[in-house]
Image: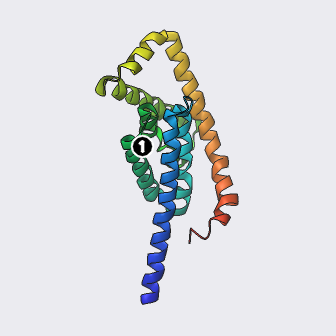
Amino acid sequence: MAGQNRSASRKQSGKIAFCGMMVALSVALMLTGGLIPIATYCAPMISGVLLLPILLEYGKKTAWMGYLATALIVLILGIDKEAAFFYIFLGYYPIIKWSIDKLRQKPMRVILKLLLFNGAVVAMYAVLGFVLHMDAVVEEFTEMGMWMLAAFIILLDICLFMYDRLLVPMTVLYANKLRPRLRFLIR
């Protein structure tokens, strides 16, 4: 009986440590958003990829907890609020991607991904501009003009599909190359 409790406790401790390391690494990456201009868009995507090991090892519920922990810490510590909000509104994508990909019809998958992504982007910028009164964001979009705004949205959609395609090989890379090396942590 005592051996079983010790084994369960050790397993739970390993889970917490592993998830904590992934969250810490995600937060460290997100903090680069304020230092490197392009990191505003790249850091949330890379941080989302770090949810994949949690998802594969411990399931959706734990991955959602890792996402929430990262989102809260980044929001509190964040140098770049735009990057933090990109993560808050889109960082969960690697968790839900696999559920969307189970749909049989490819056009439905594409439409659902575009609706989810564009809806999240519009909601994020609405919160940044109109709720949090970040006038620089509103001014930036006002100066862009309609054609530049459309080009920006198209480029973001292209980034979504590139990111979506990248998640599959990243999952395979983790499962085949990294997971065996991390077995001492994940038991």
Dot 1: within a 10 Å radius of its alpha carbon, few (fewer than 14), some, or many (20 or more) residues?
Answer: many
Q: Residue furthest right?
A: 177
Quarter that holds the N terminus: bottom left
Work out whether residue 103 can be spotted.
no
Q: Determine the residue positioned at 64% across, 62% down.
A: 179
* In this picture, residue 28 sits left or right of residue 106: left
Q: How many marks?
A: 1
The one nearer the camera, 48 or 76, is 76
Question: Where does residue 24 sit, x and y in percent of width and height?
Answer: 49, 53
Work out whether residue 165 can be spotted.
yes
Question: Which residue matches tag 1?
Answer: 74
Against 147, residue 10 (above or below) is below
The one nearer the camera, 79 or 152, is 79
Quarter that holds the C terminus: bottom right
Q: Quadrant of residue 78?
A: top left
Against 46, residue 145 (above or below) is above
Q: Residue furthest front?
A: 35
Q: Determine the residue positioned at 43% across, 57% down.
A: 61
Q: Secondary structure at mark 1?
A: helix
Amino acid type, residue under disc 1 in the picture: Val
- Colour pattern: rainbow
Question: Where does residue 154 sit, x and y in percent of width and height?
Answer: 56, 22
Q: Quadrant of residue 181?
A: bottom right
Q: Determine the residue positioned at 55% across, 32% down.
A: 36
Q: Determine the residue positioned at 54% across, 39% down.
A: 43
Question: Where does residue 60 sit, x and y in percent of width and height?
Answer: 46, 56
